[in-house]
Image (cartoon, grey):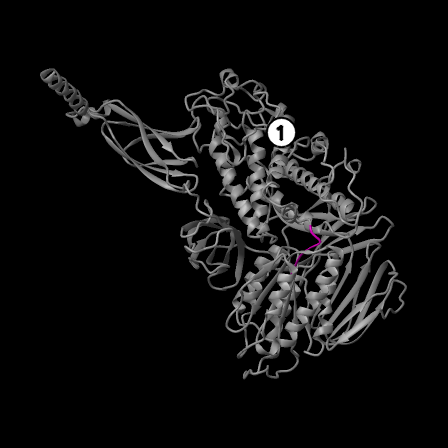
């Protein structure tokens, strides 16, 4: 075991201000000008990087020198630096960077999404401290369940949510104000709870102004060491004398007690307790690191690294047609898999997962997903090419399953000789490709220029039957290769070429042009090797270097497919290829290089916590967007200058990039993105005066609406769960039909018909999913939603939500709130005149036994007022009414969405007199018989 990472190193990041405060992310500083503060992004990145480094210290590389403390001490930690020191140039930080962005975005979304931004439990607001901690522990269980189910996307989402809440505890409560210099010992710790909380009758704050809020917490609260936190907005309503969150967007700060206590930023305008921002940030980072370190006790280090995305390559993923004519292709898949796995065993650079999805007619699946290469080969060895039937087949259904279960930034290889039956899934498959940034390549053992029968098939098929596959491969950045049974073993070597961790795209083009076509591409000083893949009706071609010399390279031709490997040394500069074509063709040029980029689109969000909301890789029509570029592997001597968006038909948009922070993020204000499909690239300088280019493999595509799905409780066997869905339309007034599905075939609503929306309007709906009684716990279930125009039937927007099935606890804590009467006050005379009833009043105080907290209290019958909120370690509800309404019924809803009814009856003078008479009678009887 290597030496443990020194504690000093774990806190090195706090000494150097990064971006922004407890505002969501780096973009917050551009919106609010609070440059010297820390954001949730800063704290989350530092925590993950520190714990990753600790794990790598504790698990030395078997073939490389051990990590040295002096290589990191006092320096800004980055993903590139950590992986470079540990793996050398064996591993690209692409997957690590992408996973880190996913965690950070999930963290920031807590301030943006409808289901979380105003939920006080998620932010430890409104004195919901005990309930917030319970929510943390529940999400932690879901995180562990996701890891057991090998559902790392969902695990990263939950990890980001947890870290956001942990960090908010120190910014939103008075823990720092009480003089604590250590983190709370019980926060987010299983089996423990948050106690010593101020009661409902305790005044916690006094009035203050923006210039005098340093000491506005009541001295008695501080001396008694009682925890409190600020109320925000109008819901829940702030009781008199309680603290507010504060800041310009908090409506409650004008109510008694005026002011606020948040420490989100170092700016007085946004944070009344801004002078304590640094202290809160220090504790928030320590607590984030502690949570991740404690998680290691329940999760193996290898699983933690998978969670963080520290891996050589995400997955080796196959979708294979198993009808009777596919025997040769299945054999080829086995041979290529063995070759790849054998090579990976020699370098210890294994994929995170091996994924296999078979299909035929009419079936598809199941998904075989494993981390064990031998188990994967066992699945492959047991595939049999049997049966068949007429074309087409369920290829897209199988591909959709593979896209859901294959990690992002991977490549899926599809083996088939048949067209697709389920073409209605094209839009959702395209959206999954763009959402998860997965390349899809098709190896088709059929000559597309002929209409010959497939083995044992009766239909003669149209020549364009594979156009769907060609379009999907083009959109995804993959390839479509037509071959035959004899050439498939040689052609499939493209798989081995593509699964290298450092493959980057230099150029790709799809065309139907006949005649002479000339294309230019650039080779830069960062390239290790370059391959050209030429496919289709190409009769001849010449490749020329920057000196206009012809290069033949190493060529391998099989049917309509040619692979050209350029020979080293590679001349830096502008190369060209001139092709003589007779029909449709594709050209893809890729190389191996550590210099690459990731990207996403976002829209600025204002409000209480301004920042940049990450879109699901599909910019919105008519909405100005910010493009964020994450630069990978670029040396200090080089730089990126521009990003390009090139529509299929139209002028290229070229926008300047500018640096956003110290860890490689750059931004471009692209405005309104070109309509339809477009390709994405970046342009930079290599430090020696030469230009270099990179292209994103996947095409982008604008959408007109945004879908969001929310569920308030985890899935459990035998339970029906309700989910909320919202659709926001940014285009013209439209009618949408939403199709719903899940990857396990659980019973659920499958359609929400005819949702009518105006421009910029959000419509909400609900749907249900029934979990079977025999559902396996720790199973990942992915719910997908597709919105299509009612008339055009073309998809407009798409979303997916990864869920986890957890076991029911022995004591089912997710029950409805339970009313327990504490006291009545006031009486209502039995014989009163109607006009006099308003002069008499009564009230009831309820103690609500619910671990999740009361979210709302509604009056179903009666006419009075109701107030509710935490009272120390419990929940208190008070109802007040005049005697004109001597009965009432309350509906209580907790933060899990569960409800309970409470019946209340006003005490009457007659009932009080009756109780007295009962005691007098008992006393007389006692005297008589004593």
Relative image position of residue 851 (x, y in whole percent)? 43, 35
Relative image position of residue 617 (x, y in whole percent)? 61, 53
Q: Is residue 314 magenta?
A: yes
Residue found 61% across the figure and 84% down from its top: 452
Asked whether residue 9 appears in the rendered view, the answer is yes
Q: Residues within 10 Å of mark 1 (few under 14, many from 20)?
A: many
The one nearer the camera, 323 or 644, is 323
Residue found 87% across the figure and 50% down from its top: 688
Relative image position of residue 376 (x, y in whole percent)? 62, 62
Asked whether residue 207 appears in the rendered view, the answer is no
Q: Is residue 7 above or below residue 682?
A: above
Relative image position of residue 296 (x, y in whole percent)? 62, 41
Give the SS element for disc 1. helix
The one nearer the camera, 548 or 242, is 242
Q: Is residue 175 above or below residue 47?
A: above
Q: Is residue 116 magenta?
A: no
Q: In the rendered image, which quarter contains the C terminus?
A: top left
Identify the main secondary structure in magenta.
strand
Q: Provide the residue span drawn in magenta.
A: 311-316
Residue receiving disc 1? 283
Tell me how many marks there are. Answer: 1
Q: Quadrant of residue 81?
A: top right
């Amino acid at each position: 075991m290597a030496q443990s990472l020194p504690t000093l190193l774990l806190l090195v990041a706090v000494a150097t201000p990064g971006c922004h405060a407890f505002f969501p992310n780096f973009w917050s500083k551009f919106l609010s000008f609070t440059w010297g503060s820390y954001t949730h992004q800063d704290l989350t990145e530092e925590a993950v990087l520190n714990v990753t480094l600790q794990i790598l210290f504790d698990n030395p590389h078997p073939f490389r020198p051990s990590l040295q403390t002096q290589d990191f001490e006092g320096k800004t930690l980055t993903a590139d630096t950590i992986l470079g020191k540990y793996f050398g140039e064996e591993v690209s930080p692409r997957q690590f960077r992408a996973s880190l962005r996913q965690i950070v975005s999930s963290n920031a979304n807590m301030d943006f999404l409808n289901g979380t931004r105003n939920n006080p439990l998620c932010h430890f607001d409104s004195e919901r401290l005990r309930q917030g901690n319970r929510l943390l522990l529940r999400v932690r269980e879901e995180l562990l369940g996701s890891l057991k189910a090998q559902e790392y996307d969902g695990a990263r989402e939950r990890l980001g949510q947890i870290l956001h809440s942990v960090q908010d505890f120190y910014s939103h409560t008075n823990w720092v104000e009480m003089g604590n210099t250590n983190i709370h010992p019980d926060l987010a710790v299983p089996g423990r709870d948050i106690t010593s909380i101020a009661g409902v009758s305790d005044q916690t704050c006094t009035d203050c102004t923006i210039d005098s809020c340093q000491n506005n917490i009541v001295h008695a609260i501080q001396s008694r060491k009682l925890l409190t936190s600020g109320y925000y907005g109008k819901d829940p309503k702030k009781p008199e004398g309680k603290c507010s969150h504060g800041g310009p967007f908090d409506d409650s700060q004008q109510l008694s007690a005026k002011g606020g206590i948040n420490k989100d930023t170092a700016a007085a305008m946004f944070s009344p307790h801004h002078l304590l921002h640094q202290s809160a940030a220090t504790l928030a980072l320590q607590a984030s690191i502690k949570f991740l370190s404690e998680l290691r006790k329940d999760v193996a280090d290898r699983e933690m690294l998978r969670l963080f995305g520290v891996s050589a390559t995400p997955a080796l993923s196959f979708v294979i047609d198993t009808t009777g004519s596919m025997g040769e292709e299945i054999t080829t898949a086995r041979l290529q898999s063995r070759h790849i796995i054998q090579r990976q065993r020699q370098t210890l650079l294994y994929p995170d997962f091996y994924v296999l999805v078979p299909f035929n007619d009419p079936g598809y699946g199941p998904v075989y997903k494993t981390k064990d290469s031998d188990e994967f080969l066992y699945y492959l060895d047991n595939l049999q090419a049997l049966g068949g039937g007429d074309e087409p087949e369920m290829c897209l259904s199988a591909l959709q399953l593979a896209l859901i279960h294959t990690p992002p930034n991977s490549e899926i290889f599809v083996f088939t000789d048949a067209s697709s039956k389920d073409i209605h899934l094209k839009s959702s498959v395209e959206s999954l490709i763009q959402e998860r940034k997965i390349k899809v390549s098709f190896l088709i053992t059929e000559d597309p220029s002929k209409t010959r029968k497939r083995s044992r098939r009766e239909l003669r098929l149209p020549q364009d039957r594979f156009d769907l596959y060609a379009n999907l491969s083009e959109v995804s950045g993959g390839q479509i290769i037509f071959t035959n049974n004899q050439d498939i073993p040689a052609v499939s070597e493209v798989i081995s070429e593509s699964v290298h961790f450092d493959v980057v795209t230099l150029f790709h083009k799809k065309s139907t042009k006949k005649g002479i076509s000339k294309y230019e591409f650039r080779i830069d000083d960062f390239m290790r090797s370059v391959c050209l893949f030429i496919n289709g009706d190409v009769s001849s071609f010449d490749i020329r270097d920057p000196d206009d010399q012809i290069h033949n390279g190493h060529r391998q031709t099989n049917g309509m497919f040619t692979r050209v490997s350029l020979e080293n040394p590679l001349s830096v500069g502008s190369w060209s290829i001139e092709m003589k074509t007779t029909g449709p063709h594709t050209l893809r040029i890729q190389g191996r290089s550590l210099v690459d980029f990731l990207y996403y689109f976002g829209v600025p969000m204002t409000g209480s916590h301004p920042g940049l909301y990450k879109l699901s890789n599909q910019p919105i029509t008519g909405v100005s967007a910010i493009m964020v570029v994450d630069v990978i592997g670029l040396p200090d001597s080089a730089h990126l200058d521009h990003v390009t968006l090139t529509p299929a038909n139209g002028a290229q948009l070229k926008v300047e990039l500018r640096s956003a922070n110290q860890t490689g993020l750059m931004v471009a204000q692209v405005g309104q993105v070109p309509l339809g499909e477009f390709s994405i690239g970046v342009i930079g300088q290599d430090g020696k005066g030469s230009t270099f280019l990179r292209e994103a493999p996947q095409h982008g595509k604008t959408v007109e609406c945004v879908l969001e799905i929310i569920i308030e409780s985890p899935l459990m066997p035998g339970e029906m769960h309700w989910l909320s869905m919202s659709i926001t339309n940014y285009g013209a007034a439209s009618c949408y039909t939403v199709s719903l599905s899940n990857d396990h075939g659980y019973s659920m609503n499958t359609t929400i018909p005819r949702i009518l929306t105006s421009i910029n309007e959000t419509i909400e709906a609900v749907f249900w999913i029934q979990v079977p009684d025999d559902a396996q716990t720790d199973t990942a279930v992915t719910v997908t939603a597709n919105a299509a125009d009612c008339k055009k039937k073309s998809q407009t927007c798409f979303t997916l939500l990864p869920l986890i099935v957890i076991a029911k606890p022995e004591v089912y804590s997710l029950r409805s709130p339970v009313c327990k009467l504490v006291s009545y006050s006031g009486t209502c005379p039995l014989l009163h005149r109607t006009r006099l009833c308003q002069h008499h009043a009564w009230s009831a105080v309820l103690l609500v036994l619910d671990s999740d907290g009361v979210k709302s209290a509604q009056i179903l019958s009666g006419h009075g007022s109701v107030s509710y909120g935490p009272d120390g370690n419990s929940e208190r509800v008070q109802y007040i009414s005049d005697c004109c309404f001597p009965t009432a019924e309350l509906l209580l809803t907790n933060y899990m969405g569960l409800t309970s009814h409470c019946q209340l009856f006003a005490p009457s003078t007659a009932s009080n007199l009756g109780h007295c008479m009962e005691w007098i009678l008992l006393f007389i009887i006692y005297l008589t018989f004593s």
